[in-house]
Amino acid sequence: MYVILVYDVAQMRVGKMLKLCRKYLCWIQNSVFEGELSEAKLRELKSQIGSIIDADTDSVIIFTNKMSYNMDKEILGKERMSTDNFL
């Protein structure tokens, strides 16, 4: 499945998140990654993200696309701004 991952984490965790996300996805912009992942690899990535972030202050948004016309949005941690009207 096609994945877009965006994160906003405290400065002390940025390096860890960058290193982790680069293992799974292509770095396309500051704190933005994209690429193809299997469902198993995506679960693995989410598990590792959960061990890095502080869910009370950090935010990770993962967009997945199983079909070209269907996009799902999942937020891990605190939502910074609602983008429901975007999709």
Image: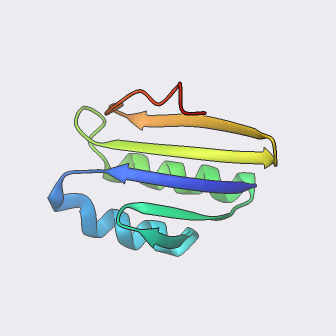
The residue at the point 66 percent across, 59 percent down is 41
Residue 3 at what x, y percent from top left? 64, 55
Image quadrant of residue 72?
top right
Of 68 and 23, the residue lying toward us:
68
Rendered-image quadrant of the C terminus:
top right
The residue at the point 57 percent across, 55 percent down is 4
In the depicted structure, whether residue 81 falls above or below residue 6: above
Figure label count? 0
Residue at the front extreme, as displayed: 86
Of 4 and 45, the residue lying toward us:
4
Rendered-image quadrant of the N terminus:
bottom right
The residue at the point 52 percent across, 49 percent down is 46
Please give left or right for residue 5 compared with residue 38 in the image.
Answer: left
Q: Which colour scheme appears in the figure? A: rainbow
Residue 36 at what x, y percent from top left? 70, 64
Please give left or right for residue 42 compared with residue 10 in the image.
Answer: right
